[in-house]
């Protein structure tokens, strides 16, 4: 089985495991990481279903004076970043997820990006939902990246990797941050 087929099978397995053992938690502890100091522009996302919760994190970032940008899927499934003020009225539902309403800031230089992931291995390889949108966005960015994971989703088993896959610099569970 090739990496692509293997990744597809792992996604199915990890989604089921995530749904079966979901526990609401908080990732606010990542805000005390040194990488969040002295930065302005942060890319984040609006979590849905069984993803690690980001609403309190996003609100805390905005309250701290950070500028939060959310991803919007554009043509070819690429991501564009839209400044978000924290108001849920400025979001629209697209499929299962929420996207910001407004024009993308094509010149934004993100300092840090909070990334969704199903699993991350100990080398920083991330398994996402399979669209490649984040891999393409991360390839164009110099931002420090951190993936949010539930307990048990940071794995010592190497994940299958394809040439386009982008590593993250860190992963956070509700208890810890691991830097790669």
Image (cartoon, grey):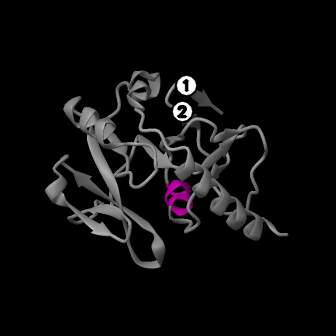
Q: Which image quarter: residue 136?
A: bottom right
Provide residue 164's location: percent of width, then percent of height. 66, 63
Image x and y of residue 177, in percent: 55, 27
For residue 176, which numbered disc appears in the image?
1
The magenta segment is 134-140
In the displayed structure, would residue 12 be above or below residue 144? Answer: below
Q: Is residue 180 left or right of residue 92?
A: right
Label 2, secondary structure: give it.
Answer: loop
Q: Which residue is mark 2?
A: 173
Left or right, residue 5 beside residue 58: right
Rendered residue at 31%/61% (across/down): 98
- Tag 1's secondary structure? loop
What quarter of the picture does the C terminus occupy? top right
* Residue at image point 39% right, 46% down: 110
> Could you tell me if residue 117 is visible in this image?
no
Q: CA distance from mark 2 to mark 1?
A: 5 Å
Residue at image point 68% right, 67% down: 8
Q: Measured along the vertical axis of the image, is residue 33 above or below residue 92?
A: above
């Amino acid at each position: 089985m090739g990496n692509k087929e293997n990744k597809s099978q792992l996604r199915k397995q990890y989604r089921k495991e995530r749904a079966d053992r979901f526990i609401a938690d908080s990732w606010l502890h990542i805000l005390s990481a040194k990488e969040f100091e002295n930065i302005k522009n942060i890319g984040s996302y609006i979590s849905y279903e069984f993803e690690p919760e980001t609403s309190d994190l996003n609100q805390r970032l905005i309250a701290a004076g950070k500028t939060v940008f959310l991803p919007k899927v554009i043509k070819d499934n690429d991501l564009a970043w839209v400044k978000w003020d924290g108001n849920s009225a400025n979001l629209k539902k697209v499929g299962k997820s929420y996207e910001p309403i407004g024009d993308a800031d094509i010149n934004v230089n993100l300092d840090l990006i909070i990334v969704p992931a199903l699993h991350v291995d100990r080398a920083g390889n991330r398994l996402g939902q399979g669209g490649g949108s984040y891999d393409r966005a991360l390839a164009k960015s110099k931002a420090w990246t951190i993936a949010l994971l539930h307990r048990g989703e940071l794995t010592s088993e190497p994940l299958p990797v394809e040439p386009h896959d982008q590593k993250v610099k860190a992963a956070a569970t509700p208890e810890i941050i691991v830097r790669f």
